[in-house]
Image (cartoon, rainbow, N blue to C red):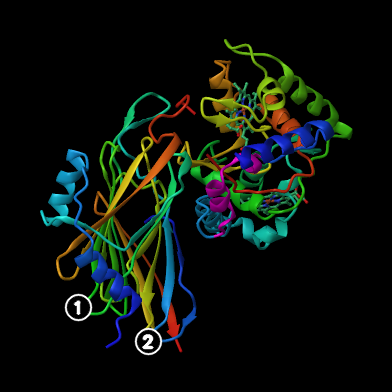
């Protein structure tokens, strides 16, 4: 069997790269354990597409995608997005069912301030992968100018 | 019932990865904002969204106040055969909003 | 900062020619992209709701559709409001025209300013003029209203003692607490404003600006408010209608 580039990438992530565990703020780390258990986080083929500079934290466009063949026994089953500096870090959690073609989600998130966004993806074999992206926020969600109107 | 927008292509080829887009009118109140009278607006959010195709799950999303108001999602399903793409939103009070469309697979 | 330079260049040209520049030009590409996305522009939720209301019969048994046909028959109408009404003997805003039809022709109660329904119907009507040049008439009987609107725009007010023009003419293009001040054009209204996480009328925007300078509020729908909107529209005549626009 010829290994596809995707499978090769996943293999790379799982075996060759060391498995760094980021120093994620405690609250986010606790949320990750609550949702996914305490399996260590590996680097993985996750792409987080976020603007480097967001003019409003009230709505920041985000695309998260994981490279995966999405076959019955080699697939991404779950994905969660956390904003480290938000009062409640979890943005959303997605379960990919049997009809999902790709582990990919586009949405708009709120960011209270300039910060790091962390994505955690769960593989069908139980492995957990993570990636992060930094966003500079000009006007954070919650810190409005005059709020009455 | 909330006002929703859905975008499902009319046709697709079998095996194709098809983009689905949805949006729902909802304030997704965080609990951190105030009315013009200065009263705190309590948390009020949609908590769950599911999309099914041929009665099987495409995605199930658990929403949090960290998503923007009027939540927007796009994601991809694998076209198999002609059937219904169904959508279901549930808010924190248990109110359900549904919508659906037919995807014709050629 | 190529973008910033481009904006300054745009402003410089605008200042020379005194050409109106849409608030769109002052937004980041992500905000512009959201406005341009005909599906994901959140304001389109109100346009959809407006279409439902358009087809709903009121007390008289008539719906907007019953008399007007499809909303597309009103293409071009939104681009020339506020407009002089001979029957009312004054300048009326689009919101007021909608309520005139409701009260006078549908025996329905007028929709309150800022209500979801009125915003939805005005978003629907304005959206029909998408891309058309704003063309508000300021001649004939509307001329006096235009002058009063301009006076309001140029008069200093509030604890900060600032006029609309101080910010939106003199300071356009500069920064205020993280905001780049635009020309204060209204060609995108009603706008979906991320700060509000909601759609809002020109009246709500004016209230926000007046609050910023701690000025006495203008009552939405009052003659002065409508005349100010007439002036705001007229000073942006020629700008393409963007409703519903997306702003930060």
In-image side of A14 versus C15 (left or right): left
In-image side of C82 versus B9 (left or right): right
Circle on res. C13: none
In-image side of C6 versus A124 (left or right): right
Total number of numbered discs in the rendering: 2
Q: Is residue A57 visible?
A: no
Q: Is residue A19 visible?
A: yes
Q: Residue at x 71, y 23 (%)?
A: C170
| Label 2, residues with CA under 10 Å away: few <14, some 14-19, many ≥20 | some
Circle on res. B81: 2
Provide the chain ID for the residue under circle 2.
B
Tell me the CA gap for discs 2 and 1. Answer: 22 Å
User: Of helix, strand and loop, which one carries label 2?
Assistant: loop
Q: Which residues are magenta?
A: C23-38
Q: Nearer the viewer, residue B67 or C201?
A: B67
- Image quadrant of residue C213? top right
**Are discs 2 and 1 both within one chain?**
no
In the image, farthest residue toward the left: A38
Q: Which secondary structure type mostly characterizes the magenta part of the structure?
A: helix
Q: Residue at x 47, y 41 (%)?
A: A54
Is residue B103 highlighted in magenta?
Answer: no
Q: Nearer the viewer, residue B13 or A13?
A: A13
Q: Nearer the viewer, residue A19 or C111?
A: A19
**Residue C157 locus on image (x, y percent):** 64, 13
In-image side of A119 versus A113 (left or right): left
Is residue C31 highlighted in magenta?
Answer: yes
Q: Which residue is mark 1?
A: A73
Q: Are marks 2 and 1 in contact (CB under 8 Å)?
A: no
Is A104 rendered above or below residue C146? below
């Amino acid at each position: 069997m010829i290994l596809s580039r995707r499978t090769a990438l996943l293999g790379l992530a799982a075996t060759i790269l060391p498995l760094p565990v980021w120093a994620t703020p405690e609250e986010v780390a606790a949320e990750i354990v609550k949702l996914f258990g305490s399996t260590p986080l590996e680097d993985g083929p996750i792409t987080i597409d976020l603007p480097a500079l967001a003019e409003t934290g009230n709505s920041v466009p985000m695309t998260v995608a994981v490279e995966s063949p999405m076959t019955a026994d080699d697939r991404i089953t779950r994905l969660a997005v956390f904003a480290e500096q938000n009062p409640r870090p979890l943005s959303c959690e997605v379960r990919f069912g049997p009809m999902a073609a790709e582990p990919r989600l586009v949405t708009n998130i709120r960011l209270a301030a300039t910060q790091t966004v962390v994505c955690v993806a769960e593989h069908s074999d139980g492995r957990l992968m993570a990636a992060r992206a930094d966003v500079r926020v000009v006007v954070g969600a919650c810190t409005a100018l005059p709020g009455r109107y | 019932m909330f006002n929703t927008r859905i975008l499902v292509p009319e046709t697709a080829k079998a095996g194709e990865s098809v983009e689905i887009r949805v949006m729902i009118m909802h304030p997704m109140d965080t609990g951190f904002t105030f009315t013009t009278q200065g009263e705190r607006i309590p948390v009020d959010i949609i908590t769950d969204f599911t999309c099914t195709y041929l009665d099987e799950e495409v995605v199930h999303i658990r929403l949090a106040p960290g998503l923007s108001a009027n939540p927007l999602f796009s994601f991809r399903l694998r076209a198999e055969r002609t059937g219904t793409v169904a959508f279901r939103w549930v808010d924190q009070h248990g109110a359900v909003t549904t919508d659906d469309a037919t995807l014709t697979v050629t | 900062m190529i973008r910033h330079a481009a904006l300054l260049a745009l402003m410089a040209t605008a200042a020379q020619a005194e050409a109106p520049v849409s608030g769109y030009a002052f937004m980041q590409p992500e905000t512009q992209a959201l406005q341009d996305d005909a599906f994901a522009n959140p304001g389109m939720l109100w346009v959809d709701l407006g279409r439902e209301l358009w087809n709903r019969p009121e007390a008289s048994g008539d719906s907007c559709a019953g008399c007007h046909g499809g909303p597309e028959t009103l293409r071009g109408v939104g681009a020339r409001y506020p407009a002089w009404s001979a029957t009312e003997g004054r300048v009326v805003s689009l919101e007021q025209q909608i309520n005139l039809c409701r009260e006078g022709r549908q025996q329905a109660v007028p929709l309150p300013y800022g209500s979801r329904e009125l915003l939805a119907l005005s978003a629907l009507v304005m959206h029909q003029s998408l891309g058309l040049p704003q063309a508000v008439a300021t001649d004939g009987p509307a001329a006096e209203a235009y002058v009063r609107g301009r006076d309001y725009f140029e008069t200093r007010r509030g604890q900060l003692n600032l006029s609309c023009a101080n910010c939106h003419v003199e300071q356009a293009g500069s920064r205020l607490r993280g905001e780049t001040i635009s020309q204060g054009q209204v060609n995108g209204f009603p706008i979906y404003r991320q700060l509000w996480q909601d759609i809002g009328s020109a009246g709500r925007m004016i209230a926000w600006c007046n609050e910023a300078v701690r000025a006495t509020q203008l009552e939405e729908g009052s003659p002065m408010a409508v005349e100010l909107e007439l002036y705001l529209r007229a000073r942006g005549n020629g700008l393409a209608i963007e409703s519903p626009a997306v702003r930060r």
